[in-house]
């Protein structure tokens, strides 16, 4: 089909990339995309970012209280055993920092987090949006009739103030996950609370009408069991009140398969704009290309035929799963959706540190990330990226969408502006390794892959054994952080450290000493050595009380750098805030090994505030209002349903070996192309679709989505604890290659 006059005029007026490229660049076979059903506005021709604004900390004044969305049990501080965190924010621009029970950062400073309830936090985020071309923020709003309601109401006011102050637009994005009385209550909430905010000059409008988004209609899972009729009623109710209504719909909405219930076509086509979910669907460039050809292209054609605007979801990639490829994944997704001719883009997410798909500023290196807990920084693949890198990519993507930058598949955004700073983080991350021996698949490289569930293990029954890393160039090495998987039983390994400039002649940096690994302290230990210039660092193990071999899940190496800045101080107090100690318990300790004057090392103890627990970290856990741990004066959680244990695909990585076991247990974590099952997927499957993205399996294509804004997530079973409550979340592992799928921000998987 040729480029019509309407398409050309509409594209130029909207300022989209259609004005900058030929029709043949936009669609296979040289056909141009259909024009937008709507002229440019606050969502058409614009970059919209999903904004959670759902983090709170004790003392911030939030009505909900506790560490909302930072901790699995929000009434205890975040720690490796009580967390929902998979990425760590860059804290340098926040006035307030709240000290957690995580180990200290790699630079020795306390591990602190921000609160969204602080107005300065919201202002900082909207300033970043202004400076990086994020036009509109979609404020996530879950069921406000529970205990979260007052906090979410207050956050709406804070977001409105920040949007007005920084010249950004915002709109309300309802998520109906787990909202059983949605049909009546969503109307009540809009009438009595949210509609008042449309009077703000910052409230987004499209076609002269206030924008509202409803996310979750038609998803094929138990968290959104609604029939088509009540959903259609809600859409028509909002439209009758003069709203421009966006539908956050399943990936396969058009076909009514996989993550979409059948029979919802009339509901989907009642929306003014359709925004299909994509988080968790793929983690590879090939997968993005597959979706562009087989899903997005026919989606856009369907929308054009029905006069509906198309706003696909784009994502930077899951940092914790290694999907980002220092920006190439995000740029490919932006490029694919812009060359398609999309009317607008929805970025998921701005501040989703729970999922690892945030574009907000993130720690650059392990120097500003809690040591030894396996949280990846932006340099996780060896490329230094500035904290604002993904904001800068978003800015360039917005310019390309608006025709201010020529359409290009080559990422124009450098990972850092200017000269990268000298190494200050974990020097061993991703570096070449070797070892005296290995036991099967438990290779030396597992100790530098950033994954605490993988580990190096030497041949059994033969000690001593050594493990070695090549730092690439000589550094003034002063400290090592050693770790084992969090859920392993306590043990002591006799460890010494050697260094070398050439890999042949080694000198002793730390003489043999017993290093204690205890689940109460996250199974981490710090070994401090006299500052020595070395390129090769070797760890030798001569004894292990837990298993007859050498075992290391993580080895981090740090160099002496300039004196770090003093820890942030609490305004009005002039001293750092202390980590809260769980009521009724004593603070935990973490091991630190320091050489004495005789050259031998001694073990010291430092407080970390962690509870003692042998449970592995439930990185993907987040409690919803119905399954939150019991609190005095509250009802207990609802009964836990039974669920079969997860199974691993062929070639999966084994779980940590427990003490006393002769064989490794069945794998529950893996790194295969088939994504991990999600919380809320009861095991039922939708009919399979022929074909699928590269590397996907029929099961991964047919798994219902797991995107619950109610905050429950699939996780490894905790010993002695009931299985997780199956509230589904937004970004289900539907039809895409990638290591595993993860929860979407806001509860969307």
Image (cartoon, grey):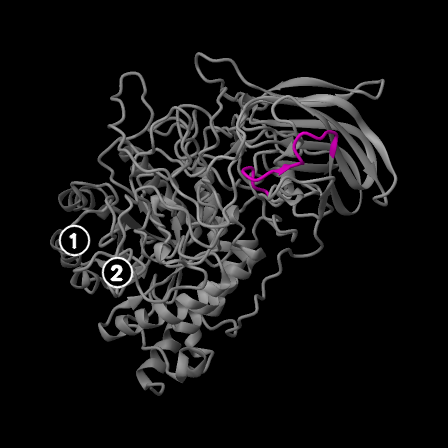
Whole-percent x and y of residue 648? 43, 45
Residue 109 vs residue 286, the one in the foreground: 286
Residue 665 vs residue 748, the one in the foreground: 665
* Mark 2 and mark 1: Cα distance apart in space: 18 Å
Whole-percent x and y of residue 727? 29, 39
Residue 503 can be seen in this image:
yes
Q: Which of label 2 and label 1 is nearer to you?
A: 2
Whole-percent x and y of residue 675? 42, 51
**Would residue 414 be counted in the magenta stretch?**
no
Whole-percent x and y of residue 632? 30, 16
Q: Residue under circle 1?
A: 231
Residue 15 can be seen in this image:
no
Instruction: Identify the residue at horizontal 34%, vertical 25% (top origin).
Output: 629
Q: Is residue 154 above or below residue 525?
A: below
* Total number of numbered discs in the rendering: 2
Q: Is residue 49 above or below residue 693?
A: above
Looking at the rendering, the stretch of residues picked out in magenta corresponds to 450-465
Q: Is residue 474 left or right of residue 302?
A: right
Residue 744 vs residue 235, the one in the foreground: 744
Residue 612 vs residue 173, the one in the foreground: 612
Q: Quadrant of residue 621?
A: top left
**Please, what secondary structure does the residue beneath circle 1 have?**
helix
Q: Residue under circle 2?
A: 257
Quarter the N terminus occupies: bottom left
**Please, what secondary structure does the residue beneath circle 2 have?**
loop
Residue at the bottom extreme? 2
**Would residue 452 be counted in the magenta stretch?**
yes
Binning the other alpha carbons within 10 Å of mark 1 as few (below 14), some (14 to 19) or many (20 upward) gives: many
Q: Quadrant of residue 19?
A: bottom left
């Amino acid at each position: 089909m040729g480029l019509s006059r309407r398409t050309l005029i509409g594209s130029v007026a909207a300022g989209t990339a259609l004005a900058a490229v030929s029709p043949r660049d936009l669609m296979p076979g040289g056909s141009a995309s259909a024009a937008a059903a709507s002229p440019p506005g606050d969502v058409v021709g614009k970059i919209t970012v999903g904004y959670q604004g759902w983090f709170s900390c004790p003392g911030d004044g939030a009505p909900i209280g506790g560490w909302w969305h930072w901790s699995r049990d929000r009434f205890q501080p975040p720690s490796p055993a009580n967390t929902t965190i998979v990425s760590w924010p860059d804290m340098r621009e926040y006035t307030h920092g709240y000290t957690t029970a995580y180990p200290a950062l790699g630079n020795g400073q306390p591990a602190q987090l921000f609160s969204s309830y602080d107005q300065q936090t919201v202002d900082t985020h909207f300033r970043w949006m202004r400076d990086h071309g994020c036009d509109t923020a979609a404020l996530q709003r879950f069921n406000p009739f529970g205990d979260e309601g007052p906090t979410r109401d207050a956050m709406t006011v804070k977001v409105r103030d920040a949007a007005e102050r920084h010249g950004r637009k915002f709109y309300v994005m309802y998520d109906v996950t787990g909202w059983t009385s949605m049909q009546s209550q969503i109307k009540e909430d809009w009438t009595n609370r949210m509609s008042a905010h449309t009077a703000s000059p910052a409230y987004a409008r499209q076609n002269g009408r206030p924008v509202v988004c409803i996310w979750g209609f038609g998803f094929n899972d138990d968290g959104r069991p609604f029939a088509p009729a009540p959903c259609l009623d809600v859409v028509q109710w909002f439209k009758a009140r003069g709203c421009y209504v966006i539908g956050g719909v399943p990936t396969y909405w058009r076909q009514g398969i996989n993550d979409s219930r059948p029979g919802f076509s009339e509901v989907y086509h009642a929306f003014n704009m359709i925004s299909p979910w994509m988080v968790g669907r793929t983690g590879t460039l090939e997968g993005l290309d597959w979706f562009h050809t087989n899903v997005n292209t026919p989606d856009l054609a369907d929308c054009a035929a029905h006069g509906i605007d198309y706003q696909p979801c784009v994502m930077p990639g899951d940092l914790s799963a290694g999907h980002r490829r220092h920006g190439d994944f995000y740029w490919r997704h932006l490029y694919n959706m812009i060359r398609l001719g999309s009317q607008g883009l929805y970025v998921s997410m701005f501040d989703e540190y729970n999922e690892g798909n945030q574009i907000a500023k993130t720690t650059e290196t392990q120097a500003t990330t809690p040591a030894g807990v396996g949280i990846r920084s932006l340099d996780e693949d060896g490329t230094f990226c500035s904290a604002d890198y993904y904001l800068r990519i978003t800015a360039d993507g917005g310019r390309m969408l608006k025709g201010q930058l020529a359409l290009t598949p080559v990422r124009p955004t450098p990972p850092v502006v200017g000269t990268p700073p000298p190494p200050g983080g974990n020097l061993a991350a991703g570096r070449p390794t070797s070892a005296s021996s290995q036991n099967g698949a438990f290779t030396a490289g597992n100790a530098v892959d950033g994954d605490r569930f993988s580990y190096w293990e030497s041949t059994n029954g033969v000690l001593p054994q050594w493990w070695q890393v090549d730092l690439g160039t000589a550094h003034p090495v002063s400290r090592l952080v050693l770790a084992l998987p969090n859920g392993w039983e306590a043990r002591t390994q006799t460890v010494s450290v050697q260094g070398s400039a050439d890999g042949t002649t080694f000198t002793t940096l730390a003489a043999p000493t017993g290093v204690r690994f205890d689940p109460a302290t996250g199974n981490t230990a710090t070994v401090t050595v006299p500052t020595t210039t070395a390129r090769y660092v070797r760890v030798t193990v001569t004894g292990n009380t837990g298993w007859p071999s050498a075992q290391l899940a993580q080895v981090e190496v740090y160099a002496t750098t300039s004196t770090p800045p003093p820890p942030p101080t609490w305004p009005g107090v002039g001293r750092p805030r202390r980590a809260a100690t769980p009521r009724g318990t004593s603070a935990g300790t973490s091991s630190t090994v320091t050489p004495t004057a005789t050259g031998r090392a001694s073990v010291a103890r430092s407080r970390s505030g962690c509870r003692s627990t042998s449970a592995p970290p439930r990185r993907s856990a987040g409690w919803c209002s119905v399954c939150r741990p019991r609190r005095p004066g509250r009802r207990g959680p609802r009964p836990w349903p039974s669920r079969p244990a997860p199974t691993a695909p062929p070639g999966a990585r084994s779980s940590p070996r427990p003490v006393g076991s002769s064989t490794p247990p069945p794998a529950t974590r893996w790194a295969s192309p088939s994504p991990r099952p999600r919380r809320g997927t009861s095991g039922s499957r939708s009919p399979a679709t022929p074909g699928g993205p590269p590397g996907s399996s029929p099961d991964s294509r047919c798994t219902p989505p797991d995107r619950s804004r109610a905050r429950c997530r699939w996780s490894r079973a905790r010993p002695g604890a009931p299985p997780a409550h199956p509230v589904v979340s937004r970004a289900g592992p539907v039809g895409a290659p990638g290591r595993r799928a993860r929860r979407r921000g806001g509860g969307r998987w």
